Image: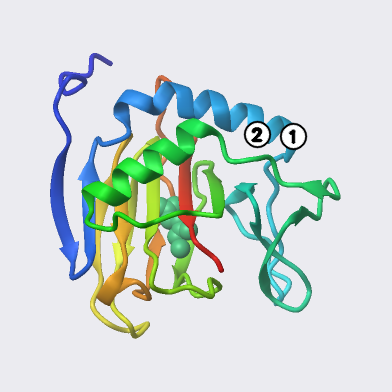
Amino acid sequence: MLDLFADEAPWQEPLAEGAVILRRFACADAQGLIAQIMQLAGQSPFRQMVTPGGYTMSVAMTNCGEVGWTTDSHGYLYSPIDPLTSQPWPAMPTLFRELSDAASKAAGYPDFAPDACLINRYAPGAKLSLHQDKDELNLQQPIVSVSLGVPAVFQFGGLKRNDPLKRVMLEHGDVVVWGGASRLFYHGILPLKPAQHALTNEYRYNITFRHTR
Ligand code: SIN
Ligand code: FE2
């Protein structure tokens, strides 16, 4: 499909206190980011993690950076070693770090220095239930989340699970940054609707940058 908005400059949409959507912010880097994801996945493959409760997540995940988010029979943790390969996670590519720097600055968090990067892959039907990102020790730092490929509905609520939810469509190149008052707000992704994207086929990829320590 011809993308009439391909040359459009990024724009910002406030989401909540401390949270903003940087629309199309990653479009210019998207092809490079996707190529890097494929290379990283060659070293630390995408896998569907099993929660401590024994539930296999529908989203497939991998990581890069000094530590990666993973599960074991006790809970969720950041580990320097990929449990699948028994090797360190691949290093964070320069392009990833540059994008994270630019996005966090644009959103008003100039000191963000992520040590972890979780990469999610959504196939049609895959979802991420409402949750808080709270496994990081340093909650002063924001989360920077980059969407690539097939669009998905993002839910963003409040500090309590049953707070009202905003629903926004996240499209290719959109970056969401949340920190400050909304750092622990509940969020999730509704089941991915089947669609095709020129760069990712049936998939949606999401990269989240985190500072864990
Ligand atoms: C996440 O909550 O870690 C990822 C959200 C997303 O896929 O947009
Ligand atoms: Fe999250």
The residue that appears at 56% across and 73% down in the rendered structure is 135
Q: Position of residue 46 (x, y in %)?
A: 67, 42
Above or below residue 43? Residue 113 is below
Residue position marked by numbered label 2 in the rendering: 40
- 110 vs 10, left or right, is right
Q: Residue 189 appears in which quarter of the rendering?
A: bottom left
Q: How is the image coloured?
A: rainbow
Crowding around mark 2 (Cα neighbors within 10 Å: few <14, some 14 to 19, many 20+) is many
Q: Amino acid at mark 1?
A: Gln
Q: Is residue 69 visible?
A: yes
Q: Name the element at disc 1.
A: helix
Q: Amino acid at mark 2?
A: Leu
Q: Name the element at disc 2.
A: helix
Q: Position of residue 139 (x, y in %)?
A: 43, 74
Q: Quadrant of the N terminus?
A: top left
The foreground one among 149 and 202 is 149
The residue that appears at 47% across and 52% down in the rendered structure is 209
Disc 2/disc 1 C-alpha distance (Å): 5 Å
- 194 vs 9, left or right, is right
State if disc 1 and disc 2 touch (CB < 8 Å). yes
Q: Quadrant of the C terminus?
A: bottom right
Instruction: Kindly give the residue lying farthest to the right in the view shown.
Output: 86
Above or below residue 132? Residue 36 is above
Residue position marked by numbered label 1 in the rendering: 43
Q: Position of residue 196 (x, y in %)?
A: 41, 27
